[in-house]
Image (cartoon, rainbow, N blue to C red):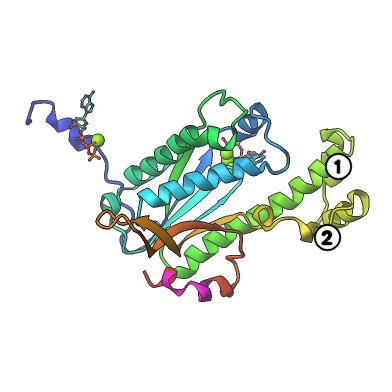
């Protein structure tokens, strides 16, 4: 095992994430603007595309048990690890690369379940990073930042595509929206396109939050052959606000890990 080449190992730099901090891994689709066009995603929000992203995140959470909560919107997903996590001795590149490849492999493997009539033209690819957050507040602010981003983008995209679908060019839609505030977009949607933004589905406005929910599952006992019911923690997508206090009060276990 100890060859004269062994010394090159020493060139590997230490990239251990700071101890006792929340770890957030965020993956983001590479060139998904083009990917969504090439695969005819509905605009502004392709539902199967969102459901495939959520499925991949659920599979990641089933495999990597340390993750306590995940948040996804558009072509990105964030996975949160508790302060006590010691996965790969907290080596950042190992954690980031494992999550990204697990996610991407699931995306290709499960594509046909969500797009049975659309051929996957080329593999989807995701970049990945790890960020440490020292305090609970920092971690919550991180998630709030992503959910606010979802809201702002969704309001813009919903208005943009309403204008385009009404027959205007994309350039004209961009022009019409330049310099507008949130309330102007609500107004354009309501007055010109008969859309009440508040009635748009939560999955689009809020993004997806995945937590491990206590779920009743039925399995067949190998001994008796009879069905047995038990409670299992199953990663489950919810479309809820995570900015306010209510969500964190409802799930106190998230902050006591
Ligand atoms: P980069 O490689 O820098 O991330 P990108 O083209 O992926 O570039 P993003 O800023 O990540 O750019 O934006 C993702 C794009 O993917 C969005 O602009 C949106 O058009 C598209 N997209 C992602 N999910 C969906 C969806 N469910 N329905 C429709 N379009 C989507
Ligand atoms: P870790 O997750 O720590 O990397 P590992 O099980 O992947 O654990 P490695 O040290 O990376 O362990 O070793 C890879 C293993 O994969 C080898 O022990 C070998 O048994 C198996 N393997 C890889 N490629 C082949 C191959 N082409 N044919 C047969 N076995 C293979
Ligand atoms: Mg980007
Ligand atoms: Mg992207
Ligand atoms: Mg993105
Ligand atoms: Mg290996």
Q: Nearer the viewer, residue 169 or 92?
A: 169
Q: Which residue, given by chain and number where applicable, does mark 2 sit on?
A: 183
Q: Which mark is residue 1?
A: none
Callout 1 crowding tier (Cα within 10 Å): few <14, some 14–19, many ≥20: many
Q: Nearer the viewer, residue 128 or 207?
A: 207
Q: CA distance from mark 2 to mark 1?
A: 16 Å
Q: Position of residue 106 (x, y in %)?
A: 45, 38
Residue shown at the point (87%, 44%) measured from the top left: 176
Q: Does the magenta-highlighted stretch encompass residue 250?
A: yes
Is most of the magenta stretch helix, strand or loop?
helix
Which residue is outermost to the left? 2
Is any atom of residue 86 visible in this view? yes
Point out the stretch of residues depicted in magenta.
248-253
Q: Secondary structure at mark 2?
A: helix
Which residue is outermost to the right? 191
Instruction: Look at the image and tell me in which quarter the C terminus lies.
Output: bottom left
Q: Which residue, given by chain and number where applicable, does mark 1 sit on?
A: 163
Residue shown at the point (34%, 43%) measured from the top left: 93
Eyeballing the image, is 99 above or below 186?
A: above
């Amino acid at each position: 095992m100890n060859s004269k080449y062994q010394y090159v190992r020493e060139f590997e730099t230490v990239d251990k994430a700071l101890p006792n901090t929340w770890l957030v891994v965020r993956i983001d689709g590479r060139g998904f603007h083009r990917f969504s066009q090439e695969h005819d995603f509905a605009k502004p929000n392709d539902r199967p595309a969102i459901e495939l992203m959520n499925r991949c995140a659920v599979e990641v959470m089933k495999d990597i048990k340390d993750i306590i909560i995940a948040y996804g919107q558009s072509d990105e997903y964030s996975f949160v690890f508790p302060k006590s996590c010691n996965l790969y001795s907290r080596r950042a590149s190992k954690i980031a690369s494992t999550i990204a490849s697990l996610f991407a492999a699931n995306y290709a493997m499960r594509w046909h379940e969500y797009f049975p009539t659309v051929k996957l033209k080329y593999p989807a690819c995701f970049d990945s990073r790890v960020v440490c957050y020292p305090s609970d507040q920092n971690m919550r602010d991180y998630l709030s930042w992503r959910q606010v981003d979802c809201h702002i983008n969704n309001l813009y995209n919903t208005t943009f595509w309403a204008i385009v679908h009404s027959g205007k060019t994309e350039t004209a839609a961009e022009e019409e929206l330049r310099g507008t505030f949130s309330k102007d977009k609500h107004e354009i949607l309501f007055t010109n396109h008969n859309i009440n933004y508040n009635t748009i589905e939560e999955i689009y406005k809020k993004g997806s939050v995945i937590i491990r929910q206590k779920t009743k599952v039925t399995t067949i006992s190998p001994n008796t052959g009879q069905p047995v019911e038990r409670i299992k923690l199953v990663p489950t997508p919810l479309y809820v606000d995570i900015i306010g206090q209510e969500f964190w009060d409802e799930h106190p276990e998230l902050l006591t890990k």
